[in-house]
Each structure stands twice: as C-alpha cells, then as structure tokens.
Amino acid sequence: MYQPPDYYQLDDLLTDEHKIIRSSVREWVDRSVKPVIEKYAQKHEPLPKSILLEMGELGALGPFIPEQYGGAGLDQIAYGLIMTELERGDSSIRSSASVQSSLVMYPIFTFGDENQRMKYLPKLATGEWIGAFGLTEPNHGSDPGGMLTHFEDKGNHFLLNGSKMWITNAPVCNVAVVWAKDETGKVRGLLVERGMEGFSTPETLNKWSLRASYTGELVFDNVKVPKENLLPNVKGLKGPLMCLNSARYGIAWGVLGAAMECYDTALHYALERKQFGKPIASFQLQQKKLAEILTEITKAQLLVWRLGLLKNEEKVTPAQVSMAKRNNVEMALKIARESRQILGAMGITGDFPIMRHMMNLESVITYEGTHDVHLLITGNDITGISAFD
C-alpha cells in the first residue's frame, strides 16, 4: 500500500479541496495506470487515448483554465498536486497532461482570441482533442531564437515551412501550437490542425525513456494556415517562454511523484528483505540512504509549496521556477538511483517501478530547458549578466 511521505506535515497547509483533488487523482492512477503501465513501457507502446479521456473526466487537463472554457478553474497548488500524482503513475502520463495544459491550453487561453478559446479549449479539456507544442527544432533546442521555421503572408492565408523535433503527442495531435518567425523575423504562434495539407507528424522510435508516450516531429511543407489561426495577443519569444514557465512549474511538482514512489518502494523492500538474518533496513548504510532520500523529498516539497503560493499571487519569477525545476528533477533522479541500489538486482526488473522512473527522469532532466541551462538562468538572475550572449 502506497504511503506518501509527509515528514513535515505539509498536508496541514492544504485545503480540504486540495486533498480531495489529490485523492481522486491518486485513486485513478492506482486503478487505471499502475496495473498496465509496466506492460506498455516494456513493449515501447504508448498508452491508449482512453487514458487522456479519463484524465479529462478527472479535470486533470487544463485544471487552471476557467470553467467557461471547459477547465476546472483550480489554483496552482491543485495543479501541482495533480502533476505529482500523475507522475507517480509515469512521467509519460504527466508529460501528456503537462503539454495539454501548460503548452497548448495555456497559450490559447492567454494569447488567443475568444473564438479560438471557444473552438479549442473545451475539446482539449475533455481529451477529445490532443494538443502538441512546437518550439524545439532539430538544430535549435536551448537557443529557440535561432529557429528556422517561418511563415509568409499570402493574402488570405499564411504559408508555413519548417520542422519541429522531440514533440510530445505529435503523432496523434489534433492541433499544434507552433512557434515560427514571420517575414520580419518576429516569433509568432500559429494553431496548425491535423489534416492541413503539407502537415505531417512522423513518430520518434527506439526510445529508452518515456516509452509509454508518443514523441515525434512536426513537419510543415507549404502548409496553408488560415489567418484566424494566428494567436493575436503575443509577439516574440515571450510567448513560448511563458508557456515553458508554466510547464516547468508543473514538472517541479510532478517529479516529486516519481521520487516518492521510489522511496516508498525502497522503504517497503528494505523492511521485508532479509540478509544475514535480519531486514536490510536494520543496516546503517540502508538507513543512511533512506534518511537522505526523505530529507531531499521534504526539501523539494517545501520548495514547490512556496512556489505555488507565489504563483497563485502572480509574484513568481521565471528564475524561481527554473531553480525548482532543476533542483527537483535532479533530486528525483538521484533518489531513483539510490532506491534502485536498495533493491539490488530486483531494482532493474519490471516487478518494481524504479528503473522505469529512472529512465523517464533522464528525459525530464533535459526537456523544458536542460539542467545546465536552468543553472545559467539562475546565474543570470543573480548577477544580471547573461551567459548566453
């Protein structure tokens, strides 16, 4: 039985609504994800669309989007708790929900017009439509300003050319929020729908990480995009970076779920596994590992809780989010590795979730800004000097 660690009684800081939301998502993960996730990950087969539809029913897609557009109208703490529980199931589940919520629904709500909001958001909130976010390119990851994807004004439509890579949900998306340069070199957002001629989404295969989710490319070959599909309320890299800020916040919470599941698995195993006539939990080195793991989880919990309050008050800065994303992903990855050692050889099998979480976190530590880039974002904030120029 899963027992989430709460060493500093942080539950006392949550509202009853927060706890009810967390419990409903936790129960769904136990019912719908845990029994099947190992099979899909081992087979390198993405989870079925029904999972996304169920998340829509839970209110886990765009939970902070207002109810009039199909969202649940929840606060940022609730969003974080949802991401934690989803990632306890698997990073691929949280990634899909994070992309749908922070990278697709958020920009449509924030930068779109009313017609765009009413057309897309309700379908995305239920999971009927799947969204993707196109920013990273084959040759431009950490430097999105160098993107080559571009569009031209052809009078009654835009003509879009270029490609995006490492895109979650790409092979099955119904709509993609695509960032491209206009004829003046200014970055703008376009809503590109499946079925538009010249738009293709080849799948990325042979992954050792996030094996239960779709990853692919977005390829644009003279795609005619209607002018009403331009996001009107943002210009420049500010748009995609604001989206990433929301996604990184969700990741900082999400990876706690992976870390807590690894800890819980390791603790139960250490109490049950006997060597030299007694449980391995009685040995000093195992207690050292478990105590250090719990300490790091507790620190990370406090970090995102405070970050959530700042986000609710609209006081949070991108650098603060970067610090939390970097710290918590590194924390979760180290905990997965330490937990695996507690389980010994059993830790590498699909009988336990640890190795799957570890491999997933190798992707999470890179996407939405690499580990080193987030460190430089903090450095820039501290010194006022950009290391990127």
Image: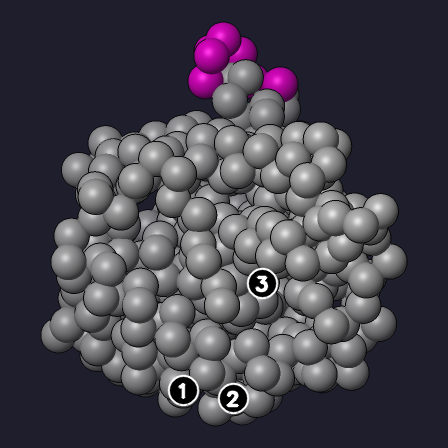
In the rendered image, residue 265, in percent from the top left (x then y), is placed at: 61, 58
What span is colored magenta in the figure? 381-387
Q: Is residue 131 above or below residue 6?
A: below
Mark nearer the viewer, 3 or 2: 3
Depicted 194 relative to depicted 74: above or below? below
As helix, strand or loop, the secondary structure at mark 2 comes to helix
Amino acid on which disc 3 is placed = Ser
Circle 2: residue type: Lys
Count residues near mark 3 (Cα–Cα under 10 Å), then give few for <14, some for 14-19, many for 20+: many
Q: Position of residue 122 (x, y in %)?
A: 26, 81
Counting from the top left corner in percent of width and height, residue 316 is at 30, 33
Q: CA distance from mark 3 to mark 1?
A: 17 Å
Q: Position of residue 369 (x, y in %)?
A: 59, 42
Which residue does the numbered mark 2 point to in the structure image? Answer: 49
Badge 2: residue crowd in 10 Å (few <14, some 14–19, many ≥20): few
Q: Label 1 near label 3: C-beta < 8 Å?
A: no
Looking at the image, tell me whether mark 3 or mark 2 is earlier in sequence order.
Answer: 2
| Residue at the spot 70% in from the left edge and 67% down from the top edge | 352
Amino acid type, callout 1: Leu
Q: Is residue 303 visible?
A: yes
Which label sits on residue 281? Answer: none
Q: Is residue 338 left or right of residue 16?
A: right
Q: Residue at x 62, y 18 (%)?
A: 387
Mark positioned earlier in the residue sequence (3 or 1) = 1
Q: Classify residue 230 as left or right of residue 153.
A: left
For disc 1, the neighbor class at 10 Å (few under 14, some 14 to 19, many from 20) is many
Residue that label 3 marks: 91
Task: Kindly identify which residue carries mark 1.
Answer: 53
